[in-house]
Amino acid sequence: MYKILIFVLLLLSINGYGQSKNRLQPDSVYANRKVKKIIAFLNSPKDLSEIIYFNPNGQIIRKVKYSASYNRKTRKRKKIDLISYYKYDSKNKLIQIVDSTIYLNNSFDINNTYFYYDSIGRLSVSKYFQRKFETPLYVTNYNYLPYKTVTIKQNDSMIIYRDLVEYEYDFYVFKSIGYTIEPKLKEGNFTNGADTSRYQYSDYKYLQRYEQTETINNKYNTKGQLISSYVYQTFLIDRKFECNLIYTYYSNGLLKSIRGYVPEFFKYEFYK
């Protein structure tokens, strides 16, 4: 008799579409409408996902992300998974994000992202540090004319993750190309008496490169608002994903919902 034991390889990809990349609007939109808080819901208008807090300049100062829910019971027992604090300098430039993270084993730790600017005040590099490690886990370089970002993760001298993201109007994502290098999956057998188990394991002696590509065909209305995004994504060896996202807005121009994959809904509170 065979018992199938499969250890699943989880690839942590920035390209995941549990939530849309283009779900926020420019700072000027929030500042002009005096937005104080966004309350975001995932799956249904009752399923709280995230609360985003803003200063009067339309800049994010805090994010609180909540655990996913799968039924009514888990919806009532939602817990905070992540709290992020955004710090700015005297010129209102973002210089640090502090993440207070709860890990799978219920341990608590702090992650930090630091932002650096060039001689003319443009964002040039950001570095993400996990827990107390002195080497950044991810480094992102920002390029202009046209605006794009390149994020890498290194293991010693080897780049094991790379993601090039291109933007429209210096804000909305429309293309992403990258790869990850992961240990090759192999199969083994384990026999215990009359039972034989087949399992998969990661062989770190052999590495395999997995390509990731994503194109997003964005469409805008005459007001410059994003109204739809056709997403086509390939990843791993032969996996594909595609969907068409539809954006709706309140009469004041703030994003109301995103539908087409996992629906998102947004409510707002305002400064007086």
Image (tube, grey):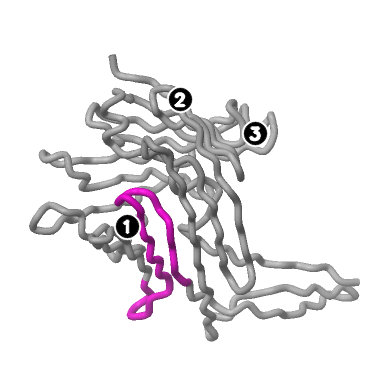
Q: Which residue is mark 3?
A: 74
Marks 1 & 3, CB-CB < 8 Å contact: no
Between circles 1 and 2, the one closer to the viewer is 2
How far apart are labels 1 and 3 at the CA level? Answer: 31 Å
Sequence-wise, which precedes: disc 3 or disc 2? Answer: 3
Which of the 4 quarters of the picture holds residue 25?
top left
* Front residue of 227 and 239: 227
**Dot 2, crowdedness within 10 Å: few (<14), some or many (≥20)?**
few
Q: Position of residue 242 (x, y in %)?
A: 60, 56
Which numbered disc covers residue 250?
A: 2
Screen quadrant of the N terminus: bottom right
Q: Quadrant of residue 45?
A: top right
Residue type at the position of mark 2 = Tyr
Pointers 3 and 2 in contact (C-beta within 8 Å) = no
Residue 133, picture quadrant: bottom left
Few, some or many residues within 10 Å of mark 1 (<14, 14–19, 20+): many
Question: Which type of secondary structure does the marked residue at label 1 adopt?
Answer: strand
Residue 272 position, x and y percent, is 28, 14
* Front residue of 42 and 29: 29
Q: Residue furthest left?
A: 119
* Residue 6 visible in image: yes
Which residue is label 1 attached to? 128
State the separation of the CA atoms marked 3 and 2: 30 Å
Relative to 119, is 47 on the left or the right? right
Residue at 61%, 74% (x, y): give it. Answer: 237
Of the numbered discs in the image, which one, if any, rests on residue 197?
Answer: none
x, y percentage for residue 70? 67, 38
Per the rendered image, the range of residues in magenta is 154-179
**Cα separation between marks 1 and 2:** 35 Å
Mark 1 or mark 2: whose residue is earlier in sequence? 1
